[in-house]
Image (cartoon, helix red, strand yellow):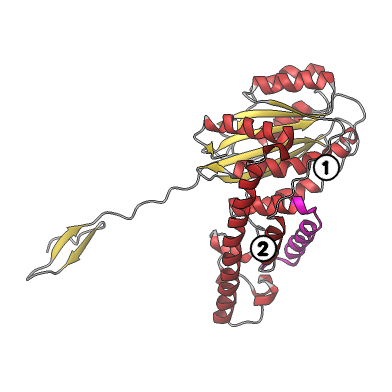
């Protein structure tokens, strides 16, 4: 007998004998392009209130990145740096697509130590190059944020190409290193401009006593209400400590200003992100199998239920979230369009960052609609 046909063939019987017809294979769905961003952030005491301003500005940067087309999968990493003799020289949080985990690490940073002008900029860039666990197929950008220059004897090292590596140690290359100077340190400005120029990046500055622009729109109340509906569907799984950490992060998010909550809601609606150990998000992204979770690691509302009842409850909450998310996406689009028509609301810093990212990412196949 002849061998059985293999895909992409099927056997049909339209007449007296079987026939083999060729059919087109199912189209492959391309994975979204990866965009990996690391922030190297000066956390010495001289940063003071500027550190808080820098934290707020990062939400805006993420929102800008999330509007790129084709829509990227965004991962964020963090290097906090000080100087020799401080509690730490560098402290790294590798890249993650859990944006709330990134912001938990970011907002935990406090300005302490330092006091002298030069800081460990070389060490910060080295940590950004080697500690982030970059992936080979991603577009990679670093933002260096600080108020002081590197030590003079290390400037040349800051200007030379860093040995960027992935998790296996393979050498990679960055698309750009952008520098953001907080304040008016003359030597810092010269060094940060030189570093950006050496790494195909841009130099941007924030004033020493910045007045953070507060953007309020007619859509903010609706965005906050809808994000609240989404937060109400949170199903935290994992160990007791993991659950407590996530619920603590949720409480911190609720404590942020209205504008920052809107920025977060906007970024999450565009990236599809949520808390990393939320069961709905994790099952949607094939991060966990509901049936494989031990009883004690299940979300509290699902414990004690039969498997069929667990699935039903999970699907009901998933449907509630999907409905709220669709409405949130529409509200965020209206907010973005409203702000785009009034760019003066954003301030010079945000406009400059948008301009920089649009130019840099265009070289890697991304574009921005507005």
Placement of the N terminus among the 4 image quadrants: bottom left
**Is residue 260 shown left or right of residue 333?**
right
Placement of the C terminus among the 4 image quadrants: top right
Percent coordinates x, y for residue 98 in the rendering = 65, 52
| Residue annotated with mark 1 | 52
Q: Quadrant of residue 189?
A: top right
Residue at the location (70% across, 74% down)? 300
For the stretch drawn in magenta, the main secondary structure is helix
How far apart in space, not on screen, are marks 1 and 2 (Cα)? 27 Å
Picture disc at residue 274: none
Picture disc at residue 226: 2
Residues 227 and 278: in front is 227
Q: Is residue 237 visible?
A: no
Residues 87 and 222: in front is 222
Q: Is 319 drawn above or below residue 353 in the view shown?
A: below
Q: Is 327 drawn above or below residue 91 in the view shown?
A: below
Q: Quadrant of residue 204?
A: top right
Q: Is residue 247 visible?
A: yes
Q: Is residue 244 magenta?
A: yes
Secondary structure beneath dot 1 equals helix
Q: Is residue 9 magenta?
A: no
Percent coordinates x, y for residue 235 in the rendering = 66, 68
Residue at the location (41% across, 51% down)? 29
For the magenta stretch, what is the residue range? 234-260
Nearer-N-terminus badge (1/2): 1
Percent coordinates x, y for residue 254 in the rendering = 78, 59
Percent coordinates x, y for residue 160 in the rendering = 66, 20
């Amino acid at each position: 007998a002849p061998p059985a046909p293999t895909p992409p063939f099927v056997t049909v019987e339209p007449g007296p004998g079987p026939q083999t017809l060729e059919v087109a294979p199912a189209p492959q769905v391309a994975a979204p392009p990866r965009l990996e961003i690391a922030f190297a952030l000066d956390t010495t005491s001289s940063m003071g209130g500027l550190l808080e301003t820098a934290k707020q500005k990062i939400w805006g940067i993420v929102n800008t990145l999330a509007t790129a087309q084709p829509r990227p999968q965004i991962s964020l990493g963090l290097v906090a740096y000080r100087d020799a003799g401080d509690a730490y020289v560098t402290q790294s949080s590798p890249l993650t697509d859990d944006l709330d985990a990134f912001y938990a690490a970011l907002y935990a940073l406090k300005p302490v130590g330092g006091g002298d002008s030069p800081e460990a900029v070389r060490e910060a860039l080295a940590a950004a190059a080697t500690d982030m666990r970059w992936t080979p197929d991603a577009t990679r950008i670093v933002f260096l944020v600080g108020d002081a220059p590197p030590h003079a004897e290390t400037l040349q090292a800051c200007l030379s190409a860093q040995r960027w590596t992935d998790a296996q140690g393979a050498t990679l290359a960055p698309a750009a290193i952008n520098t953001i100077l907080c304040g008016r340190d003359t030597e810092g400005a010269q060094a940060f401009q030189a570093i950006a120029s050496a790494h195909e990046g841009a130099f941007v500055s924030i004033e020493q006593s910045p007045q953070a622009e507060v953007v309020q729109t007619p859509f903010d109340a609706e965005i906050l209400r809808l994000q609240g509906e989404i937060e109400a569907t949170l199903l935290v799984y994992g160990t007791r400590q993991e659950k407590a950490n996530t619920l603590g992060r949720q409480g911190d998010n609720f404590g942020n200003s209205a504008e920052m909550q809107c920025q977060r809601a906007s970024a999450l609606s565009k990236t599809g992100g949520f808390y990393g150990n939320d069961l709905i998000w994790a099952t949607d992204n094939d991060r966990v199998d509901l049936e494989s979770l031990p009883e004690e690691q299940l979300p509290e509302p699902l414990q004690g239920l039969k498997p069929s009842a667990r699935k039903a409850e999970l699907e009901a909450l998933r449907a509630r979230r999907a409905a709220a998310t669709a409405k949130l996406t529409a509200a965020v689009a209206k907010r973005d369009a409203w702000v785009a028509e009034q760019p003066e609301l954003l301030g010079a810093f945000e406009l400059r960052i948008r301009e920089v990212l649009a130019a840099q990412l265009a070289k890697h196949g991304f574009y921005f609609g507005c």
